[in-house]
Image (spheres, rainbow, N blue to C red):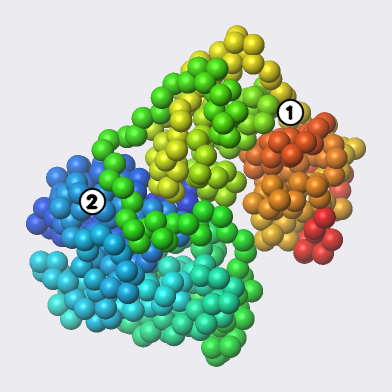
Amino acid sequence: MGFPDEHLIPLVDEGLGNSAYLVDLGDGRALAVDASRDLRALRAAVARRGLTVAYAADTHLHADFLSGAVQLGHDHGATVLASAAGGRAFAHRGLVDGDEVDLGGLTLRALATPGHTDEHLSFLLLDGGRELGVFTGGSLLVRSAARTDLLGADRTEELARAQFRSLHRLAALPDDTAVWPTHGAGSFCSAPQGAERTTTIGAEKRANPLLAAPDEGAFVRRLVAGLGTYPAYFDRLAEANRRGPAVVVGTPPLPELTAGRVRALVAEGGVVVDVRPAAEYAAGHIPGSVSIPLRGQFATWLGWLVPDTVPLAFVTADGQSVSELVWQAYKIGYERLAGRLAGGMPAWLADGGPQATTAFVAPDRAGGRAYTDVRQEAEFAGGHVPGAVHIELGDLAHRAADAPRGTLVACGHGERAMTAASLLERAGHTDLAVLAGGPADYAAAQGTRLVEGAEDSRA
């Protein structure tokens, strides 16, 4: 018999592919596990139940989001629970392997599970001596385990071997023990695609290909072979979390900027980020602006493609949520938000500002150009247009010269391709077109078939 569902509230960030958890302890208090700095969903859940967050547990120094633990300590007086080995520079209760925390009827036991990071802890939730579930963070995931290359290529194999031992330690728990990972589908911490966010020890012993590896060497080869690229901002956030993110009161403001102020910011080295839908950007945009449509994946691509060291000005569409934009930026440590263009593109044009356009073409009108695919390696290998040039979007700013001139830029639907086109335009490319659709749409319209594999995949 597992933990009652009504007492465990998963809080899923679909964009980053992560889950935080809120545990209702039954006495008006709650435990939060791996909460991000964007606490809007957690605050709503707490308010609905009339809870106070008494404990905020972090499994590791997250690379893909800023922790909300410091904020919960400020707002609720929560005790922050984290690895003593993490060297955190703020008030917390440092835990080592085997330490237990009395939650008032339930117990939380720290399990050292290094691999994803050195200081990684899993947290086993106990009712007396019975294992209810384990918060596995970036250790055991649904059908996978988190990547081991975040501390550098020279540590990847060593940490993969540690991950092997950690997964087998967790696999020794009873089969009916619930597994509550932080990283899930959509995370660049190597979680596979799929709808399941939670699992059980027994299910993973039956179906996790890493646990099926016959020995440690095979496990390491299998894990490392599946590592793809990851966003550039991952390299910055572990240290930011060690120091502790600044406390934020309310939603940070996003001031309105005149067209003249936007021009001045660009002259001073700032970047204009256009968050409107791809079709609106294509129809007319500020030359040199970066297109990153405001959607679930906005934070990922902002953190991958735009520096956090320069002021950012935004172009928004009518009806887009300013608070959503701000919190997606803040949860990955982007705080130099200068503001947004007041009145949008009409105000820019009325002030005499120049405008650029980008062709956004349907699959049946997209032939006759070189085809540049900016999806991830695994996506490309799963099926691509014959003869396509492959450059991952995350690499494009450094490889713009490898893209054919006048190319058709494509991804899965069009959003990433529009971002790619904006980067190519900043690098001096002209006469670009973006595919409104994906490779299957293009192949059907052009009377060809997709091919699989990575051969001939790079420029």
Query: Looking at numbered disc 2 in the image, what kind of residue is underneath it?
Result: Leu
> Going by the image, does 255 lie left or right of 93?
right
Q: Looking at the rendered structure, which numbered label has been put on residue 444?
A: none
Q: Please report whichever mark, 2 or 1, sits nearer to the chain's N-terminal start.
A: 2
Quadrant in the picture for the N terminus: bottom left
Return the x and y of residue 366 as percentages of the image width and height.
Answer: 82, 35
Q: Is residue 205 shown above or below 4?
A: below
Local SS, label 1? loop
Quadrant in the picture for the C terminus: bottom right
Q: Looking at the rendered structure, which numbered label has been put on residue 358?
A: 1
Decide if residue 171 is in sight here. no
Task: Tell which residue pokes out farthest to the top in this image.
Answer: 350
Decide if residue 174 is in sight here. yes
Q: Quadrant of residue 180?
A: bottom left
Return the x and y of residue 235 as percentages of the image width and height.
Answer: 51, 60
What residue is shown at x 14% (from left), y 66% (from top)? Answer: 103
Give 352 or 6, whichever is nearer the viewer: 352
Q: Looking at the rendered structure, which numbered label has been put on residue 72?
A: 2
> Going by the image, does 91 lie left or right of 321?
left
Query: Looking at numbered disc 1 in the image, what kind of residue is underneath it?
Result: Thr
> Going by the image, does 276 lie left or right of 170?
right
Give 444 or 385, whichever is nearer the viewer: 385
Task: Tell which residue pokes out farthest to the front in this image.
Answer: 268
Return the x and y of residue 450 as percentages of the image width and height.
Answer: 80, 54
Q: Is residue 233 shown above or below 110?
A: above
What residue is shown at x 80% (from left), y 59% (from top)? Answer: 457
